[in-house]
Image: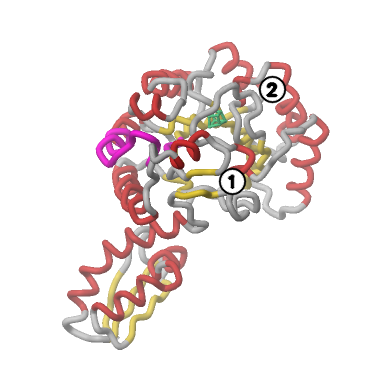
Amino acid sequence: MKKKPLIIPIFIPQEGCPHRCVYCDQATISGVSQPSWSPIAVREQVQSFLDGSRRRYPVQVAFYGGSFTLMSEARQRQFLEPVQEFLKRGQVHSLRLSTRPDAIEVNNLRFLQTMGVKTIELGAQSLNDKVLSASARGHSSRQVHEATQSLRQHGFEVGLQLMPGLPGDDWETFMQTVEETIVLHPSFIRLYPTVVLSSTPLERLYKRGLYLPLSLSEAIDWCKEAKKRFSRATIPIIRMGLQPTVSLELPGRVIDGPYHPAFGHLVNSAIWNERISPVLQRASRQSPRLVILAPSHQLADIRGHRNGNINRWLTELRLTSLETVADDQIGVGEFRVITR
Ligand code: SF4
């Protein structure tokens, strides 16, 4: 299996971003309220992560949030230059940043290459122009296509972030976004179902009855289908759902919507439920005592949140016992059911 990089995160909420997308409260999402990074602070952050980690390979410094390429080149340098010494010493292997699809400019891409940036994540959010406009994104789906192509031509690894459930989005428009994204074939995807955060324009729309977020079960269904389609297209999803942060979990921050601290786990469990249920059903005709064998890293998702899948199968199939057992000889993404 490919080694996961050690990510050293540097959150720069809304720095460089003159926009105000309807849902955006970067400070709450990232858990950082003061974008006060100095070059010394960037260097110290990298050093302290390296000191605190025994893992040495591969290491990536990630500038998350905001719109990195909208900052002046002088300000971009203040983030990128302090990391150069770590790159030269081989302690950091690459850099990653996120930005907007309409903030990709060829001269700046060349500069980023010289500074060791390998991965650029684009906040695409949707590939439907009506949804983008209703969400005040300020860019079109065509700009997402152009930015993705331009980044790839310049040798960058491209990731796309999508937000199911934005204003104007429905099952059809989201699946259209998924299909168009598959055509673009990014290196990875992040799915962030839209939630209503306090003090955002979306909260005002919601309070006036002009926006209704997805329920948690709808968001799970949408992301389940998206994950299945992306998996078939061999495009990995590296995150589903907002990262739980202290500020996001403060009372009153999330007004409504499908926020759950273990959202990705819920989606993965729902997919396993769909795959394993018919196999268990057939096996339950032979014995009420069953065992699911699967690679160890899959067992938690198979069992479900708080053993939800296990308990449902026990009840619905009238089983007397149902165990999950690690078997790392079984291929990734596979499972077997045996009788006891
Ligand atoms: S582009 Fe990103 S940082 Fe800027 S307002 Fe929109 S979501 Fe927030």
> Which amino acid, mark 1?
Pro
Q: Position of residue 11 (x, y in %)?
A: 66, 38
- Farthest front residue? 208
Between discs 2 and 1, the one toward the N terminus: 1
> Which amino acid, mark 2?
Gln
Residue shown at 51%/33% (left/top)?
Answer: 201
Disc 1 secondary structure class:
loop
Residue 309 magenta = no
The answer to which image quadrant residue 189 occupies is top left
Report which residue position mark 1 lands on: 5
Q: Position of residue 99 (x, y in %)?
A: 55, 27
Residue shown at 24%/84% (left/top)?
Answer: 318
Q: Where is residue 108 in the image (x, y as percent from the top left)?
A: 60, 15
Residue shown at 72%/40% (left/top)?
Answer: 91
Report which residue position mark 2 lands on: 76
Question: From where the camera sits, is residue 157 visible?
Answer: no
The answer to which image quadrant residue 175 occupies is top left
The answer to which image quadrant residue 24 occupies is top right
Marks 2 and 1, how far apart at CA: 23 Å
- Quadrant position of the C terminus in the picture: bottom left
Is 179 rendered above or below residue 228?
A: above
Give the left or right position of residue 280, taking residue 77 as reference: left
Give the left or right position of residue 302, taking residue 45 as reference: left
Mark 1 sits near ligand 1, with its Cβ under 8 Å away? no
Which of the four quarters of the rendered structure image does ligand 1 lie in?
top right
Q: Give whichever of 290, 140 is nearer the camera.
A: 140
Q: Where is residue 93 in the image (x, y as percent from the top left)?
A: 65, 37
Q: Give whichever of 49, 56 is nearer the camera.
A: 49
Residue stretch in magenta = 161-178
